[in-house]
Image (cartoon, rainbow, N blue to C red):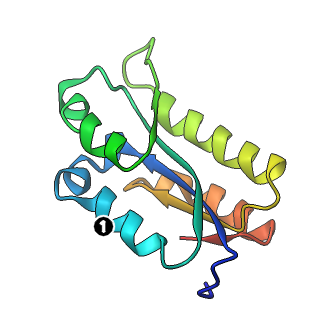
Amino acid sequence: MTQQKANRIAVFVDAENVTNWIKHDGVRLLMEELNQYGQIIIRRAYGVWSKPNLAMHQAAINQSGFELIHCYHPVTGKNTADIQMTVDVIECAWQLPNISCFVLVTGDSDFTPVFRRLREMDKDVM
């Protein structure tokens, strides 16, 4: 990705899969890095925020300006957060053509088709 200040960036965090990264100041470090590449327009973090392992990180994520998307799981074992994040990413790509770069923070390979589709739409993906 080129280092242009004109880049408009959307950041989506699969918080359920990166709790260790969050715990080790990953959110703040990522925001510092991304600010060099452009303007961060969207910041969203997905998970079941009532779970203790995520609830303890809410303050740190909020300090970085993230919208916390609570993904209630009506059935145990379902990937509600992954599905909601995927829908939001693709919807954002279609509705906001001025977003040039998508950053998906996840430890989950299930997002590979999303990465491919964004690249097909001529978006930078990190």
Choose between 42 and 13: the one closer to the eye.
42
State left or right for residue 115 relative to residue 121.
Answer: left
Choose between 112 and 56: the one closer to the eye.
56
**How far across and down, in percent of the image, does residue 115 sit?**
62, 63
**How far across and down, in percent of the image, does residue 92 sit?**
72, 47
Specify the quadrant of the image occupied by residue 98: bottom right
Q: Amino acid at mark 1?
A: Leu
Answer yes or no: is residue 79 visible.
Answer: no
Which residue lies most toward the bottom here? 2
**In the picture shown, does residue 12 fall above or below 73?**
below
Residue at 48% across / 71% down in the picture? 35
Q: Residues within 10 Å of mark 1 (few under 14, many from 20)?
A: few
Q: Give the mark count.
A: 1
User: Which quarter of the rendered picture does the N terminus lie within?
Assistant: bottom right
Task: List the residue tagged with mark 1.
Answer: 29
State left or right for residue 53 relative to residue 43.
Answer: left
**How far across and down, in percent of the image, does residue 19 sit?**
24, 46
Choose between 110 and 89: the one closer to the eye.
89
State left or right for residue 28 relative to residue 13.
Answer: left
Residue at 26% across / 37% down in the picture? 59
Secondary structure, mark 1, is helix
Residue at 64% across / 84% down in the picture? 4
**How far across and down, in percent of the image, does residue 67 sit?**
48, 37
